[in-house]
């Protein structure tokens, strides 16, 4: 059964009233049936007492049965032997009760008199072999039952009306926190995401619902702030190579330079263009990853071969800084991964390690299998990362040394891309730093 209405309050009130109506109706019927059964049981007990009294006064061969009813108008009973009526009391005759009752296996039954009145009768055989029928009027019992029925019939609509009114008031009070939350939520926008919904009782259902909404608002606020920072940082990072390009171009146009000088200007512009291209590609990669539009081709791959290729690609960069790039790789390690994204993660981590390791330092790459997991570690001998930076090191555009040049420190997207690439392959990226003795970036993949 579906109940539709213009408001939750009305529907709650209607459901409450219908449920209570059903309960009250069942209760009233139960009371009515119980009282009616109880009254007739008491009437039957009176009939049993009357039957026992008369049966005890009968003899084997009663001569004058009028002695059983000396007053003539007190007892209602009928005495039969065989098919012959031996005696009817005066009260029985005046009541207009039948002389021969219909055959029935029931001891107690209700009979109608000639005048239409109802009497409760009990018929049974006495120890002397007589068929004795005694009767009592049901008028008192039925009057009581009728009165009870009227009381219940009148009380039911009054009780339901009061219940509906009380339910409407209680529903209003119950839904008051929801109205307060709706009013507050309607006022929350991008400019005031820091505001939260009111919580009257954090332990009840509405309090828990408000808590869920507040945590959602907190996540939205965090995402919105990160988006704002991302937009601002991206604009700043894009502005730098564009400004450099404009400056070099303006100098080349305003001054008369020789061929070699023009070649240097063009080379500088190409370097800035390459940096701008890398930055845009990184931004596009992260944007596509966030939107879920970047499809991966995960299948069985040789992780050892992927790591070896990444190390070979970065070895020239390490040699320029006179660094020792060593490897300790378990052979033929297999995993279900996307080759391109994992290789990008390894290259970015190696690039970060080489950049922040001083001249003549060392970078070690280790790959091993243990307990159903694949562990790749990149350890450097740099200065390490202080605790306040470790939680943010994987954030986009975050750099430990804000004063470091972009040529040396990059745009701060490499580790963010590495973290995404590892997680996209079902793994996790961990950092272990021993300031000032270097850092270890650990990729953990499941077999």
Image (tube, rainbow, N blue to C red):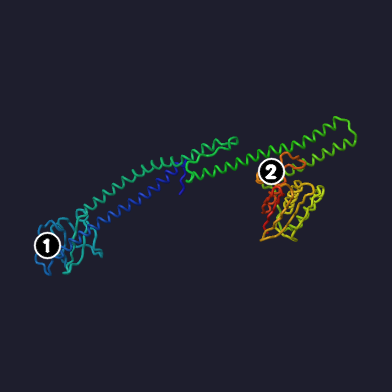
Residue that label 2 marks:
396
Residue 165 falls in which quadrant of the image? top left
Q: Mark on residue 41?
A: none
* Residue 349 x, y percent position in the rendering: 73, 49
**Which numbered disc, 1 or 2, marks the residue closer to the eye?**
2
- Along the viewing direction, whichever of 173 and 15 lies nearer the viewer: 173
Looking at the image, the residue that sits furthest to the front is 436
Residue 6 visible within the image: no
- Along the viewing direction, whichever of 372 and 335 lies nearer the viewer: 372
Q: From the viewer's perspective, is 262 left or right of 26?
A: right
- Along the viewing direction, whichever of 358 and 421 lies nearer the viewer: 358
In the picture, which quadrant includes the C terminus?
Answer: bottom right
Is 218 above or below relative to 296? above
| Category of crowding for the residue at label 2, using alpha-carbon neighbours closer than 10 angstroms: few (below 14), some (14–19), many (at least 20) | many
* Residue 353 x, y percent position in the rendering: 74, 48
* Residue 229 x, y percent position in the rendering: 66, 39
Mark 1 vs mark 2, CA separation in Å: 113 Å
> Residue placed at 31% from the left, 52% from the top?
31
Residue that label 1 marks:
68
Secondary element at tag 2: loop
Is 56 above or below relative to 427? below
* Residue 255 x, y percent position in the rendering: 86, 30
> Residue placed at 65% from the left, 38% from the top?
228
Looking at the image, the residue that sits furthest to the top is 254
Question: Contact (CB < 8 A) between labels 1 and 2?
Answer: no
Residue 99 falls in which quadrant of the image? bottom left
Is 311 above or below relative to 221? below
């Amino acid at each position: 059964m579906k109940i539709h209405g213009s408001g939750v309050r009305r529907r709650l009130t209607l459901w409450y009233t219908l449920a209570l109506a059903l309960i009250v109706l069942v209760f009233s019927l139960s009371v009515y049936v119980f009282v009616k059964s109880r009254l007739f049981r008491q009437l039957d007990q009176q009939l049993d007492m009357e039957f026992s009294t008369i049966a005890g006064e009968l003899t084997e061969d009663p001569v004058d049965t009028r002695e059983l009813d000396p007053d003539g108008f007190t007892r209602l009973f009928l005495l039969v032997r065989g098919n012959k009526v031996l005696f009817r009391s005066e009260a029985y005759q005046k009541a207009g009760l039948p002389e021969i009752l219909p055959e029935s296996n029931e001891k107690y039954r209700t009979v109608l008199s000639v005048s239409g009145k109802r009497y409760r009768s009990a018929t049974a055989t006495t120890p002397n072999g007589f068929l004795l029928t005694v009767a009592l009027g049901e008028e008192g019992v039925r009057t009581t039952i009728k009165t009870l029925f009227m009381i219940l019939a009148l009380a039911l609509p009054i009780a339901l009306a009061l219940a509906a009114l009380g339910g409407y008031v209680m529903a209003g009070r119950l839904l008051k926190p929801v109205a307060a939350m709706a009013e507050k939520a309607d006022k929350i926008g991008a400019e005031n995401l820091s505001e939260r919904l009111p919580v009257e009782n954090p332990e009840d259902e509405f309090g828990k619902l408000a808590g869920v909404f507040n945590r959602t608002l907190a996540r939205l606020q965090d995402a919105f702030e990160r988006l704002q920072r991302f937009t601002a940082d991206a604009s700043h990072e894009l502005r730098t190579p564009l400004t450099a390009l404009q400056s070099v171009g303006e100098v080349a146009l305003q001054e008369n330079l020789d061929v070699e000088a023009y070649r240097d200007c063009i080379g500088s512009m190409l370097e800035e263009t390459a940096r701008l291209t890398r930055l845009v590609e990184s931004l596009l990669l992260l944007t596509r990853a966030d939107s879920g539009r970047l499809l991966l081709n995960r299948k069985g791959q040789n992780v050892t071969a992927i790591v070896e290729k990444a190390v070979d690609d970065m070895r020239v960069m390490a040699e320029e800084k006179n660094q020792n790039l060593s490897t300790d790789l378990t052979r033929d390690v297999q995993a279900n991964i996307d080759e391109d994204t994992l290789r990008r993660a390894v290259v970015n981590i190696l690039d970060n390690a080489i950049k922040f390791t001083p001249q003549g330092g060392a970078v070690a790459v280790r790959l091993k299998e243990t307990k159903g997991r694949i562990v790749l570690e990149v350890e450097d001998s740099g200065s390490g990362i202080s605790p306040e930076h470790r939680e943010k090191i994987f954030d986009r555009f975050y750099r430990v040394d804000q004063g470091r040049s972009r040529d040396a420190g990059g745009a701060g997207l490499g580790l963010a891309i590495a973290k995404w690439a590892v997680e996209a392959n079902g793994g996790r990226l961990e950092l272990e730093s021993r300031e000032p003795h270097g850092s270890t970036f650990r990729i953990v993949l499941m077999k």
